[in-house]
Structure formats: C-alpha cells, structure tokens
Image: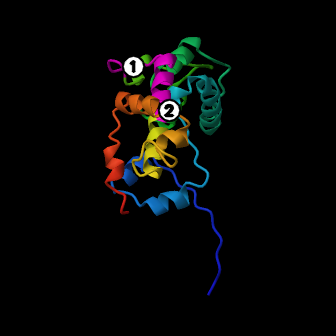
Amino acid sequence: SISVDVRVLAATHRDLNTLVAEGKFRQDLLYRLNVVPLKVPSLRERAADIPLLVEYFIDRFGKKAGKKFRRIDKRTLKLFQAYSWPGNIRELQNVIERAVILSDGDTFSVDDTWLRQEPHQVASPMVALNGALLRQEKEMIEAALAESRGRVSGPGGAATKLGLPRPTLDAKIRRLGINKYRFKLHQSS
C-alpha cells in the first residue's frame, strides 16, 4: 500500500451549510473540506479592485494582440465600477479582451452598450455592502444552527456559539427568513 498525504482545494457558489441542513450534502464531508474556509466576494462587492483588474487585463490582452494603451478612458472606468458584473470577473475579462481586440487607438475605452444593462442591475457600493453583510450574517447563523442541530439556547445552542442573547438571535432569524426547524429535522444524520 502507498501512503498519501494531500490537501483538497474546493470551490463552490452554493451555501453548503444550507445543503447539509436540507440533507443534500454530507455533514462529515463539509467538516473535512471546511478546514480553512475562504470567502471571495463577488466583483460587484469589491468595486475598488476594478481599476487594478482593468489594468492587468489590458496589459495581458494588449501584449497578446500586440497593442499598447497609454491611458484608460475615465468614463469607461466609472462605467465598470458602477456595473454589477453578474458574470463576475469572467465577464470583466471578456469585455476587456473584446475592447482590446476591436480598439484602434492608444486610449482604452468601452462602448457602454457592451454591458448588459437591465433595470436594477447597477448597484451602489452601499447597497452591495449591505447585501453582503446580510448574506454573511445569514450564513453565520445557519452554520451555528447546523452545528447546534437547530438548538437556539443553552450551552451548545446557536445563540451561545454566536455570543448573542437568545431574543436577539430569534429576531435575526425572523428578519433573515431562516427556518430554524429545518436544522432539527436532520438530528439523526
């Protein structure tokens, strides 16, 4: 027999704690995979990173196409930072590659019709931050409920794990629309 020591790097866009609670993902596998969890926010949640990413992709695709850009159009940069990027970084990458290929001058710019502008798609940074905070809070509460098997109060309860008074946690559970009973259904797992 051959002994092997490996580390598994896994990525998902799904909430595995919710899937565990619904019986769609094995809890023991989650614990094995969840040694060092990293949460990478979506591009719309880190608009401040966009200028650096734009420079990187312009340089990368410019070299590939044999083109050199001396400057980036400010309107294009503002457009990129205001856009919600539903396709995340891959969409940004594709838009930049397309612009590099089609551009003739030494100024990088993008036609705003290239971006899918649908109603309510452009989010302000504050709305994006609030949404991110609510999602993070919900994930933490659901993880504590899954770990405590739906128990809210007491020594092993979710409120204790989160360092919250029970009434505060109950209010958050209601406000976030969390069904705490679904975590109790899987106690025998």
**Numbered range of the magenta stretch:** 117-137
Side of 83 relative to 51 (left or right) = left
Q: Is 69 contained in the magenta span?
A: no
SS label for mark 1:
helix
Whole-percent x, y for residue 108 in the image: 58, 21
Task: Tell us which disc is closer to us: 2 or 1.
Answer: 2
Colouring: rainbow
The residue closer to the viewer here, 30 or 106, is 30
For the view shown, which residue lies furthest in the top direction? 75
Give the position of the C terminus as an image quadrant.
Answer: bottom left
Determine the CA span between mark 2 and mark 1: 50 Å
The residue closer to the viewer here, 106 or 37, is 37
Q: Earlier in the sequence, mark 2 or mark 1?
A: 1
Q: Residue 16 carries which label?
A: none
Residue at image x 50%, y 31%? 92
Side of 145 relative to 23 (left or right) = right
- The disc labelled 1 sits on which kind of residue? Thr
Q: Mark 2 points at which residue?
A: 165
Q: Name the residue under label 1.
A: 113
